[in-house]
Each structure stands twice: as structure tokens, then as C-alpha cells.
Image (cartoon, rainbow, N blue to C red):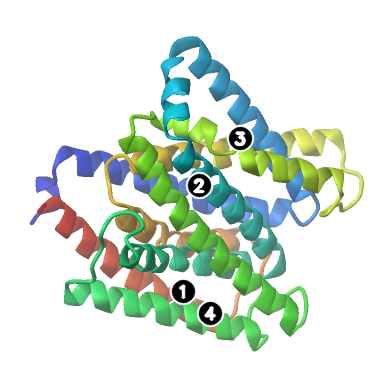
Amino acid sequence: MSIYQLKQPIWIGLIWSFLYIGLESTQSVFFGSALQSLDSFLLSLLVFGVTTTLLSAGIFSFNRQQFSHAQQCLIPLIACNLSTATGWVLYLIAIQLIEPAVAFTVSSAAMPIAAIVFAHFSIGEPEHLDTVSKRFGMVMIIFGMLFLGLTILAGYSGFVRGGFAVELGGLLCAIGSGAAFSLMLVYCRALDNAGLSPTAVFAFRFFAYLVIAFAGWLLQLDYKGPVESNDLIRAVLIGLIIMAVPLFAMQKAIASVSVFLLSSITALGPFLVFGFQLLEGRVEYSLYTLIGLLTYSLGAMITVLSLIRHESEN
């Protein structure tokens, strides 16, 4: 089937999906750099706090019925909050411990893998690796993720902040964040099916994380010293653009494509991160990182193309 024959909802979902992953890749590099000198809890508290406050105020003013919908589906909303908070906390830790491109790759790889595992246990939509291309793509994703993990643990990555324990901790945090984000997509999809608008889901799913970020900031769990007000304001403004916008795009995408497809499209992001890191010049890359990323990215592309064909035919 030609891509021009795709149904309109698929087109819309794909546009939002690729907008999401492009901006998500940009923010991954930015926060990997910014969080070396800024308190991650304070920065994300300000970015998500401003976003949640503005959107909630707008919903209250123009579409107050969304609050009633939210009350009617409290369980998936709470689950969405908890998975969102878990994913972000683990991810923010991971990109400070290991190479951002590797952290993003491992986290992204864990998302489609977790989607399949969740589906196996009847969590979310049923998903099956029912074609050769899907199975081959997933095998390459897993191989690339394992190769990159071994590269980090062997000390061949271009960016390592500590010894074996730090590297292993970073990898486990990245895997955990990807699994949490995949579960978040499952509940975002459930909330969308329950009648909550993408804007409302986006506004209401950060409450748990804001509590954690506030506590982390008060306890100075990631305090790195005083920061100039201008530097913090600049970081927050940039964060509002490259963190909030892609997350809204993700919420729009999940209304039109499956969790497995969006997770697999997210898996394409790491190669973009790698390219941004080269342009930024902050991280020295290694040949091993490049090999792992190329293998992984090829597997992700095969999986995405197979899923697009499958969803367009159903």
C-alpha cells in the first residue's frame, strides 16, 4: 500500500507523532546539557508547573466539563500521573549518569518492548508480532539496546560520569523510564477513549510529578549550587517550548495511532539525538555507540513501516 493511500486519522497521527519525536529529541540534548549545572527538580517543576497551571486555567474557563470527565475516570488518571512521574524522574536521573544519546536510546527501546509485554498481560491494546518484519525489527531493537548497554558498562561510551555502579544505575533508570512511559501511553489512550481531550489529559497528568519535583527541590536532592536568575529564566522559557510542546504533540498523536506504533516511532528519536550531540560538540562519541545506534535505528524503522502498513489496512 502506498503511503498516499493511508486513512486520514493515520496521517494526522503520524504527523503529530513525528513532530513529537523531533521536538523530544531536541529537548533530550538540551536537558542533558542544562541539567549538568541546574537543579533538575527545580527546572522541571517550573516548566511543568507553568504549563499545568495555564492549561488548567484555560480548561476551567472554556471547557469546564473536562473536570467532570476527569472525576469519572480517576483510576486511569491516577495511573497516568504515577507512570508519568516515574518515567520523568528515572529519565532525568539517567541522562545525568550516562551518555544522553544512549540514555534516550535505551529508554526509547524499552517503550515498544514494554508495550508488547503489557499487551501480553492484557494491559492496554492487544499487540502481536505477527509478521516477519515486525519480529525482525524488534530483534534489531533489542540487539542494539543490549549492544549499547554493554558499551556503557565496558567503558567505551563517549560520556561516562562514574564507575560500573553508576553506569549500571543509569542503564536501569533508562530502562525503567521507557517502561513507565509506555504504561503512560496506555493510560493516555484510555483517557482519550473516555472522552478527555488531549489538552485536558496533558494538563492533568503531571500533578504527581509536580509533588515529587517540589519535594526534591526542597530537599535539595539535585542541588548544584547557586544559579543566575537570567540563566534559570532562559532555561525555563526554552523548556516550555521544547518540553511542553512535544508532550502535547504526543497526546494528540495517541488519539489516532496505537500505543505500539507511537512507542516504535519514539524509538526513531535516538538517532536524531546522536546527530544533535555531534552538532553541539559537547560529547565525544565512540565507534561502538555509532554501531549500536545504527543497528537499533534500522530495527526501529523496519518496525514502524510494518506497523504503519498494518494499521492502514485495519
**Residue visible at 42% across and 17% down in the picture:** 65
The residue that label 4 is drawn on is 148
Q: Residues within 10 Å of mark 4 (few under 14, many from 20)?
A: many
Q: Nearer the viewer, mark 2 or mark 4?
A: 2
> Residue 211, relative to residue 278: is it above or below?
above
Residue located beneath label 2 in the image: 79
Residue 247 % position (x, y) = 49, 41
Secondary structure category for the residue under label 3: helix
Disc on the earlier residue, 1 or 3: 3
**Are the residues tagged 1 and 4 within 8 Å (C-beta)?**
yes
Q: Residue 275: tell me if it is visible.
A: no
- Pointer 2 and pointer 4: residues touching (CB < 8 Å)? no
Q: Which is closer to the viewer, label 1 or label 3?
A: 3
Residue that label 3 marks: 240
Task: Choose between 149 and 75: the one closer to the eye.
Answer: 75
| Mark 2 Cα shell of 10 Å, populated few (<14), some (14-19), many (≥20) | some
Front residue of this view, candidates 39 and 157? 39
Q: Which residue is mark 1?
A: 293
- Give neighbour class at mark 3: few <14, some 14-19, many 20+ (Cα, 10 Å): some
